[in-house]
Image: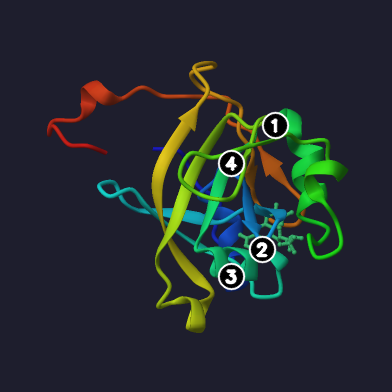
Amino acid sequence: MPARTAKRDFPVVNARQILEPGPVVLVSSAWRGKTDIMTMGWHTMMEFTPSLMGCVIASSNNSFGMILKSGSCVVNVPTYDLADKVVGIGDCSGADTDKFAKFGLTPVPAKKVEAPLIKECFASFECEIADKRLVKTYNFFILKIVKAHVATSPKRPKTLHYHGEGVFSVPGTYLDLHKRFARKQNL
Ligand SMILES: Cc1cc2nc3c(=O)[nH]c(=O)nc-3n(C[C@H](O)[C@H](O)[C@H](O)COP(=O)(O)O)c2cc1C
């Protein structure tokens, strides 16, 4: 057991810096001939079958209306070589900027939703809104992944994980402990 330093009082607003779920994703959307992309640092898997994820999209984001009105989006997973674009996309609004053009990204038609995939990303998940009951109170969207596109390599991509205050981490160490699991379960 590693020794721990004494714990100090910590601002609850910063709990997100430690509970980051990662990886940072780029959410693309389309509505009435326009597209948008937003950077998203926080999301959570909620169910495996059907494949449900939850996320908060601030109503001040242009993407909020695009996703709500179209009922769908694509959750794209960038690797760390796209870090500058990830920050830039999260630092301007699709209301007055064509982010695909500005950041030199390639839109690829999706199979099941209107929003385009981002070609340069490692993975792209086509999503439909499964439940919007919590949008009004928490801006919380429950998305159902209806189609997944994942690059065949590398097996362990160097994704970006956000810790707040402009700080990101990139995974470097993996522990394969599958032999330590006594129960067979889909975790
Ligand atoms: C690293 C990072 C993580 C972010 N995470 C979220 C998030 O989880 N939810 C959210 O609503 N906005 C998040 N944002 C902010 C949006 O990406 C940002 O407001 C963006 O400009 C919205 O673009 P849009 O107005 O074109 O939709 C994040 C920004 C950055 C840089």
Which label's residue is closer to the chain start, 4 or 2? 2
Residue 100, percent from left and from top: 78, 43
Mark 4 = which residue?
Answer: 76
Please report the residue visible at 80 percent of the width from the left and 62 percent of the height from the top: 93
Query: What amino acid is labelled 1 in the image?
Result: Tyr
Mark 3 = which residue?
Answer: 9
Please report the residue visible at 49 percent of the width from the left and 17 percent of the height from the top: 152
Whether residue 127 sits left or right of residue 180 in the image: it is right
Q: Alpha-carbon distance for marks 3 and 4?
A: 36 Å
Figure check: 104 above or below 58: above
Marks 4 and 1: in contact by CB < 8 Å?
no
Residue 178, percent from left and from top: 26, 24
Figure check: 174 above or below 128: above
Q: Residues within 10 Å of mark 4 (few under 14, many from 20)?
A: many
Query: What amino acid is labelled 4 in the image?
Result: Asn
Mark 1 = which residue?
Answer: 80
Residue closer to the observer: 124 or 13: 124
Q: Which of the 4 image quarters holds residue 70?
A: bottom right
Which label's residue is closer to the chain start, 1 or 3? 3
Mark 2 = which residue?
Answer: 63
